[in-house]
């Protein structure tokens, strides 16, 4: 890949990340939630399969007090519906390097976000919250 192709790919990925952040943050605002995601938060959550599961994991990790009044499923579904109304695409994880042919990569396969959270994925806290 030449430098101009790499730059174009990076620019497209950056634009995608910004579009996702704008959609999520607008959804939070519309629902009266005091969440504000940044690029680090979005990309760290992207390791969890499923957008609704990502949102639920974030709520449980950083805003567990909300779970006294609402279920994680209800909140994450409401947020995702608002987000998808603005920008329905899901963030694709960028792979900078593909493994060599014949190289086997092992990643833990888990079926539930709560199991993935047991790997101590550190989700950044929001500034000012």
Image (cartoon, rainbow, N blue to C red):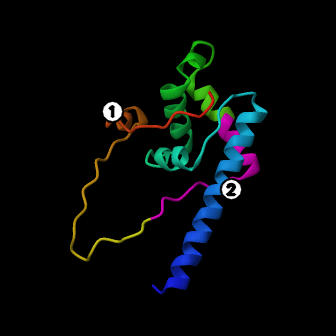
Name the image quarter holding the C terminus.
top right
Which residue is the site of mark 2?
A: 19
| Cα distance between the residues tagged 1 and 2 | 29 Å
Magenta-tinted stretch: 79-94
In the foreground, 90 or 21: 21
Q: Residue visible at 55% across and 28% down?
A: 59
**71 left or right, relative to 103:** right
The outermost residue toward the right is 30
Name the image quarter holding the N terminus.
bottom left
Expressed as whole percent of the image width and height from the top left, the position of residue 68 reads 58, 12
Which residue is the site of mark 1?
A: 118
* Secondary element at tag 2: helix
Q: Residue visible at 61% across and 69% down?
A: 12
* Secondary element at tag 1: loop
Q: Residues within 10 Å of mark 2 (few under 14, many from 20)?
A: some
Expressed as whole percent of the image width and height from the top left, the position of residue 78 reads 68, 33
80 in magenta: yes
Say which mark, if any, is on residue 76. Answer: none
The outermost residue toward the top is 68
User: Residue 26, located in which quarter of the rendered image?
Assistant: top right
Q: Residue visible at 63% across and 34% down?
A: 77
25 in magenta: no
In the foreground, 110 or 122: 122
């Amino acid at each position: 890949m030449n430098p101009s192709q790499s730059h174009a790919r990076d620019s497209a990925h950056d634009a995608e990340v910004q579009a996702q952040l704008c959609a999520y943050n607008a959804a939070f605002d519309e629902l009266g939630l005091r969440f504000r995601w940044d690029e680090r938060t979005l990309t760290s959550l992207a390791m969890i399969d499923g957008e609704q599961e990502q949102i639920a994991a974030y709520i449980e990790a950083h805003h567990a007090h909300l779970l006294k009044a609402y279920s994680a499923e209800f909140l994450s579904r409401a947020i995702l519906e608002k987000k998808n109304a603005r920008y329905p695409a899901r963030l694709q994880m960028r792979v900078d390097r593909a493994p060599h042919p014949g190289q086997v990569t092992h990643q833990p396969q888990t079926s539930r976000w709560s199991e993935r959270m047991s790997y101590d994925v550190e989700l950044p806290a929001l500034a000012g919250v």
